[in-house]
Amino acid sequence: MPKFLVVHVPFPTPMPLEQAVPLLKRSAGSMTAEAYWIQSFCQANSEGNAVRAYCRWDGTSLEAVRDAVAKLMPEMPVEGVYPLVALDSGDFR
């Protein structure tokens, strides 16, 4: 299945990670076969609060992922949804 990177920025305010967890749990419980969340990384500020999130999704299309994110997390603005190619250091040994 194709892979996508969803970039969330900016958060409405820098968000403590404890506040982000319920959003992620809601996403995990509401995914469909057309688009589902795999993993996220957060960029933190000096206080440890999330200021940007990079989320890996698998989906049937860019539109399916975009629609799922808009439906599941309307309170987290999206900078963009991009096709993703994953490279692993093990691939080059």
Image: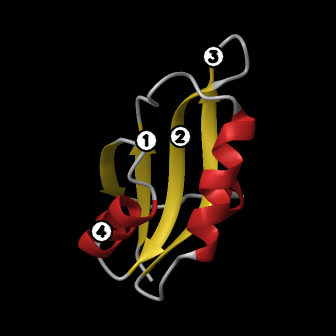
How far apart are the two marked residues, 2 and 1, measured between alpha carbons?
5 Å
Q: Which mark is residue 45?
A: 3
Crowd band around label 1 with a 10 angstrom C-alpha radius: few (<14), some (14–19), many (20+): some
Considering depth in this image, is 2 or 32 the residue closer to the camera? Answer: 32
Crowd band around label 4 with a 10 angstrom C-alpha radius: few (<14), some (14–19), many (20+): few
Q: Earlier in the sequence, mark 2 or mark 1?
A: 1
How far apart are the two marked residues, 3 and 1, measured between alpha carbons?
15 Å
Residue that numbered label 4 is attached to = 67
> How far across and how far down the image is residue 56, in percent?
52, 59
Give the residue drawn at x 56%, y 58%: 87
The quadrant of the rendering that contains the C terminus is bottom right
How far apart are the two marked residues, 1 and 4, measured between alpha carbons?
14 Å
Secondary structure state at the residue bearing disc 4 = helix
Q: Earlier in the sequence, mark 1 or mark 4?
A: 1
Secondary structure state at the residue bearing disc 1 = strand
Considering depth in this image, is 44 or 5 the residue closer to the camera? Answer: 44
Residue that numbered label 2 is attached to = 53
How far apart are the two marked residues, 4 and 3, measured between alpha carbons?
29 Å
In this rendering, is residue 52 above or below 72? above
Give the residue drawn at x 67%, y 53%: 22
The disc labelled 4 sits on which kind of residue? Asp
Considering depth in this image, is 82 or 33 the residue closer to the camera? Answer: 33
* Disc nearest the viewer among 4 and 2: 4
How far apart are the two marked residues, 3 and 2, measured between alpha carbons?
12 Å
Give the residue drawn at x 69%, y 10%: 46
Residue that numbered label 1 is attached to = 8
How far apart are the two marked residues, 4 and 2, measured between alpha carbons?
18 Å
> How far across and how far down the image is residue 88, in percent?
64, 58
Q: Earlier in the sequence, mark 3 or mark 2?
A: 3
